[in-house]
Image (cartoon, rainbow, N blue to C red):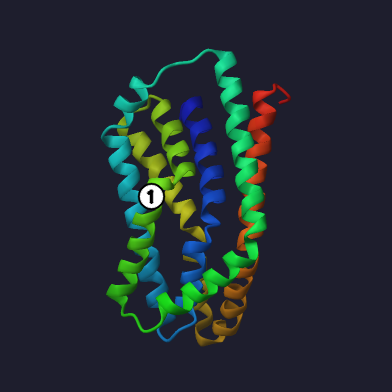
């Protein structure tokens, strides 16, 4: 594998791991897993999330991705550094907002989980996962950054699509882990998963603030030439 592909692969995994800490997908998956037939229901939800995310990435990479990248202007180093600093500061501002609203996010997540997950069949649960992901895709900026890095390698389309698959495997890894725990432990996992659900809702705002803050600091540092 060429160095650009290895670099892009490392970046894709890193972004995918950060993006996988998504309370709007993890929390409903846990809520579904603790119900009757929880493994099947959580697996259907995971499939809905993963397939829509994967389809969106494939469309962008195999379709307009190369053309969009070619049409973008290529600014000089100074403009790039200023842009990195500005974008980093914007992420820091979002991190501050996420921290300030963490308690409200906790309440909304808990209520949404109970309302969305209760009493739905497997098909409806698949649709719930697909619907959540479809709503989030237009603002999935980490995913767009990963796709830009993938298209920027200039590698053959097959290699680029494999990187898209890699991103999505990493992205749904927490959901797959929830399904695995439910399958292996059965009903005994219910109490542990319930505690995990409450923990996800309680810490979602903090995790989001930390991820956004870390990304913002890194961009500011790169833009200022500190690293």
In front here: 154 or 134? Answer: 134
Q: Nearer the viewer, residue 193 or 177?
A: 193
Q: Closest to the observer: 149 or 117?
A: 117
In percent of the image, x 39 and y 70: which residue is there? 43
Say whether residue 122 is left or right of residue 171: left
From the viewer's perspective, is 214 left or right of 47? right
Query: Where does residue 10 sit, x and y in percent of width and height?
Result: 54, 38
Dividing the picture into quadrants, the one containing residue 162 is: top left
The quadrant holding residue 60 is top left
The residue depicted at 57 percent of the width and 77 percent of the height is: 193
Q: Is residue 218 visible?
A: yes
Residue at the (60%, 22%) spot, across then down: 82
Which percent across, then down, holds residue 56? 32, 47
In the figure, 177 relative to 50: above or below?
Answer: below
Q: Is residue 134 left or right of residue 22?
A: left
Q: Residue at 38% of width from left, 24% of height from top? A: 154
Q: Mark 1 highlights which residue?
A: 137
Percent across and percent down for residue 53 are: 36, 52
Q: Is residue 143 above or below residue 67?
A: below
Q: Is residue 201 left or right of residue 59?
A: right
Q: Residues within 10 Å of mark 1 (few under 14, many from 20)?
A: some
Element assignment for label 1: helix
Residue 217, position as x, y percentages in the image: 68, 37
Seen as rendered, the residue at the extreme top is: 76
Residue 183 in sight:
no
Considering only vertical position in the picture, is 145 above or below 176?
above
């Amino acid at each position: 594998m060429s160095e650009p592909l290895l670099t892009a692969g490392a970046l894709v995994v890193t972004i995918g791991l950060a993006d996988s800490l998504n309370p709007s997908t993890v929390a409903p998956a846990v809520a579904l897993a603790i119900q009757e037939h929880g493994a099947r229901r959580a697996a259907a939800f995971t499939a809905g999330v993963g397939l829509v995310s994967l389809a969106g990435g494939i469309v962008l990479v195999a379709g307009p991705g190369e053309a969009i990248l070619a049409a973008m202007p290529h600014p000089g180093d100074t403009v790039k550094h200023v842009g990195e600093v500005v974008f980093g500061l914007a992420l820091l501002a979002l991190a501050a907002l996420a921290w300030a609203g963490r308690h409200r996010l906790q309440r909304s997540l808990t209520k949404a989980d109970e309302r969305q997950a209760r009493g739905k069949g497997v098909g409806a649960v698949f649709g719930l996962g697909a619907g959540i992901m479809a709503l989030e895709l237009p603002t999935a900026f980490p995913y767009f950054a990963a796709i830009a890095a993938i298209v920027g390698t200039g590698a053959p389309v097959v290699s680029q699509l494999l990187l898209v698959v890699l991103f999505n495997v990493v992205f749904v890894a927490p959901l797959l882990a929830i399904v695995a725990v439910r399958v292996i432990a059965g009903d005994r996992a219910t109490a542990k998963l319930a505690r995990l659900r409450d923990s996800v809702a309680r810490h979602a705002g903090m995790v989001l603030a930390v991820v956004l803050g870390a990304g913002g600091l890194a961009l500011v540092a790169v833009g200022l030439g500190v690293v």
